[in-house]
Image: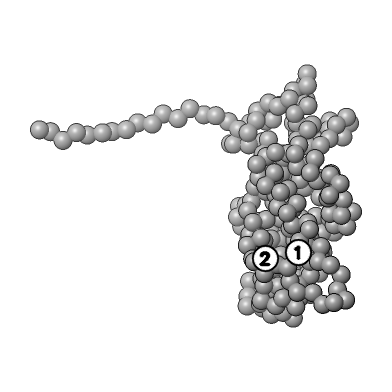
Amino acid sequence: MSATATWVSPSTRPELIDELVSGVDRYNPANGGILEDYLYHQIRSQEYDCLANLAILKLYQFNPDLYNGDVVINILIKALTAAPMPDFNLCLALLGERRPYPESDDDEPDPLPSLLPYLTALSELLHQCRFPEFWKLYKSEPLAPLRENYTIECLGFDDSVREVVVRAVRAAFTKIGKQRLSNYLDLDGEDFVSFVEDVDWSLEDDVITIPPNPDNRIEATVVHENIQFPRA
């Protein structure tokens, strides 16, 4: 199955969710709870379904009274790890300009406005392949609420970010220095060695070798052009 087909219809999507996402029922506010439960299943199981999560944001767009800031943050966290796919920006587009949503007097403060600029910055760093800066920001004091209240509940979040790193390194390198890759992955020691072995890369003399793939192989291409000039 192609990457696009997997994005549109992941193999882990339940039949009920597939029916909701594919039909007009995705606009039925009564189904919001079902889609939110499915999001939290993704959080707990390391699965991911962007279209189902976008359907939640669309419901919030049409029905502001359904809005849940915690749900939106979890959707954005899952979208972060889809880089370089544009999932995060798609989510932002559906949030639109209607933030912040109205709150009643006895509601807790919406956590989204304070975390959204940081989540956006994290997304930009991943798309720019500035991985050491990503880890530095992610582990900074201002993002303690994100780590302690959200990503701690998201199974395998750090490893999912490292998969983003692996995709980028695979596409750009045939060899990379150990220290450089260690900074990219935010791993060292035995954890680093184990990770390199798990992705089938080889480590020798502080240099990691990445096996050839269609993205990191440079092949010369000869272009023949047949240009005909009109006769006088």
Q: Which mark sits nearer the N-terminus, 1 or 2?
A: 1
Label 1 to label 2, Cα distance in Å?
9 Å
Rendered location of residue 118, percent (x, y): 75, 51
Rendered location of residue 124, percent (x, y): 67, 47
Confirm or deny contact between disc 1 and disc 2 (CB under 8 A). Answer: yes
- Give neighbour class at mark 1: few <14, some 14-19, many 20+ (Cα, 10 Å): many
Identify residue for label 1.
Answer: 72
- The quadrant where residue 199 appears: top right
Residue at 84%, 49% in the rendered image: 142
Q: Is residue 13 left or right of residue 232?
A: right
Rendered location of residue 127, percent (x, y): 66, 45
- Give neighbour class at mark 2: few <14, some 14-19, many 20+ (Cα, 10 Å): some
**Of residues 15 and 60, the one drawn nearer to the viewer in this rendering:** 60
Q: Is residue 71 visible?
A: no
- The quadrant where residue 225 appears: top left
- The quadrant where residue 97 appears: bottom right
The quadrant the C terminus occupies is top left
Residue at 84%, 54% in the rendered image: 146
Amino acid type, residue under disc 2 in the picture: Leu
Q: Of helix, strand and loop, which one carries label 1?
A: helix
Q: Is residue 168 visible?
A: yes
